[in-house]
Amino acid sequence: MNLKDFWITIVSELATTLGRSEIITWFKNTAVLSLENGFLTVGLPLPFFVNWHSQHFAHITLEAAKKIDPSIKSVVYQVDLTLGDNDPRVIDILKHFPEKPSSRKLPKKNEIKYENGVVSKILNPKYTLENFVTSPENRLAHAACQNVAKYPGQNYNPLFIYGGVGLGKTHLLQGTGNEMLKNDPTRVIVYTTTENFTNEVVDSIQNKNMERFRNKYRRVDALIIDDIQFIANKDRTQEEFFHTFNSLYESGKQIIISSDRPPHELTLLNERLVSRFESGMIVDVKMPDYETRLAILQSKCQEAQVIISREVLEFIAFNIVTSVRVLEGVLKQAIGQYELAHTSPTVKAVAEMIRQTQKEVKMIGFIENDPIPRSAVTIEMLIDSVSQYFTVSRSEVIGESRARECMVPRQVIMYLAKTKLRMSLAKIGRTLGDRNHTTVMHAVEKMNEQLKNDRQLLRDINAIAKEVGIH
Ligand code: ADP
Ligand code: MG
C-alpha cells in the first residue's frame, strides 16, 4: 500500500467516530510523509494544527494505523507548509468523504473528549464562564461573553473588554472561547496574546511568509486577542491586525479583544482601529465588592477541595482590594499552609503572609503584636463605636427616628461602611434596620457633600475611623 492509500484507510477509520465536518476541518491537506522504523510521520499544513492533532487525534490515529501495520509504534506530527490542494501527497478529502444527506448525525465525539479533560492547548480549560463569579462590577461583561458564546458573530462584534490588571479579562476571554468550542467542537477558535501576535508578524516578515500568516488568521471562526494595549506603537502589527480584523468582521466571524483601558484611551493606536473597536460592544471589569471577593475565595476553595476557615477568608477578602489575581495569590499561599498542616491557617498566620508578600497592602483588622488576632472590622463594630461616640443607643441608630441625634450617626455608619469597609449598599441597608440601598446611597452622597465644608464632621469621622482601626 502506498502512503497515500495508507492515509486514506486511516482517516476513513477515524471518520467512523469523528464527525464529517471535523474530518474536513482537520484532515484537509494532511498527508503521511513517511513511515520508517515504526514511526508514522503525518504532515500538517499549519503550525496550530499540531496541538490540536496531538491532543485530539494522536491516540486514535495510532490505533487505526496499528490495525493496518502492527509494527507502527508512534505517530509523529510535522508541519509542512507546502501541503496544499494540488499536492500529490494530499488526499482529496471532499471526494473521499462526500456529504451523505441521509446519514445519521454522528455524536460529537469531541465534546465527550472535551468533558474528559482533553482540550485544545490554546485555551486553558480552567477558565470557564461558569466558574467566573459575577458581581455588579463585572456582570455586564460576563453577560456579553455569554451572549457571544451563544451567538458568535451576531450581536456583539467586536466585543471589547477593558479593565485593570488581574480583574478577570483573560478568564472571560478564555471562558468564552471554551464555551464556543463546547457548543461546537469543530469551530476553529484562536486565542492569542497581542505579544504573540506581534511576534508572529515579525517572524512572518523575516521569513517572507506573510501570506501564510494571513491565511492562518483569516480562516478562523473566532479570534480572541488579549491585551491589545501592547499593539501601541507597533505600526506594522497594527496594519496586519487591521486587515485581519476587517476580513473576519466582514465574513461575520466573532472577534473578542481585551485591553487595560477603553479604546479611545489607546492613544498610540491607529484611529481606524479605534473606530473599529468602538463599533462593537464595549464593557469594563472593575474590582468586585467585598461580598463577591468572599464568594470568589469560597469558590476557589471548593475547586481546590480545601477548607479554609471563614474568618480567614473574610480577612483576605477584606484586605485585598486591588486585584483578583492578588486575592487568589494570597489564597494559594493559605492553601499551601493548609496542605502542610492539614488545618486551616489562622488569621494571624495569613496576616503575616500578606505582610511579607504584599508589601503595599495596608491591613485592617489585624493589629501588629495584638495577642488575639482579630478578623476584619465588621459593621457591627462600627455601629457600636459610632453609637458610643455620639452617645446614642444602638437601637436608636438602627431604628426609625428621624431626629438629628440619630440621623447623623446613622449616616456616618453608612458612609464609613461604604468607603472604608467597602460593603455593598444593599448589605449596609439590610444591616441597618432593613433600609433600601437607595437610602444608603443618598446618605453617602450627602456625607460626601457635607464633608467638603464641615470640618467638625470630618474630625468626628476621622476620630471614629481611627478608633476602629480603619483610617
Ligand atoms: P486579567 O486578565 O484581567 O489581568 P485574569 O483573567 O488573569 O485577569 O484574572 C486573574 C485571576 O483571577 C485568574 O486566575 C482568574 O481566574 C481570577 N478571577 C478574576 N476575576 C474572577 C471572578 N470574577 N471569578 C473567579 N475568578 C476570577
Ligand atoms: Mg490577562
Image (cartoon, grey):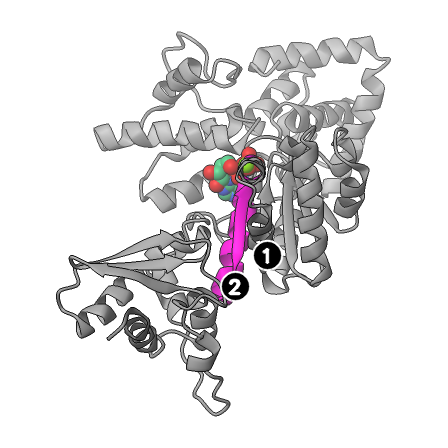
Q: Position of residue 418 (x, y in %)?
A: 67, 29
Q: Quadrant of the N terminus?
A: bottom left
- Range drawn in magenta: 170-197
Q: Is residue 174 magenta?
A: yes
Q: Residues within 10 Å of mark 2 (few under 14, many from 20)?
A: some
Residue wearing tag 2: 187
Q: Is residue 12 left or right of residue 126?
A: left
Residue 119 falls left or right of residue 175:
left
Image quadrant occupied by the C terminus: top right
In this view, which residue lies farthest toward the bottom? 102
Q: Is residue 432 visible?
A: no
- What amino acid is found at the position of numbered circle 1 in the picture? Ala
Mark 1 near mark 2, Cβ–Cβ under 8 Å? yes
Give me the residue at 51% from left, 51% from top: 175
- Residue farthest to the right, as pictured: 453
Q: Is residue 82 visible?
A: yes
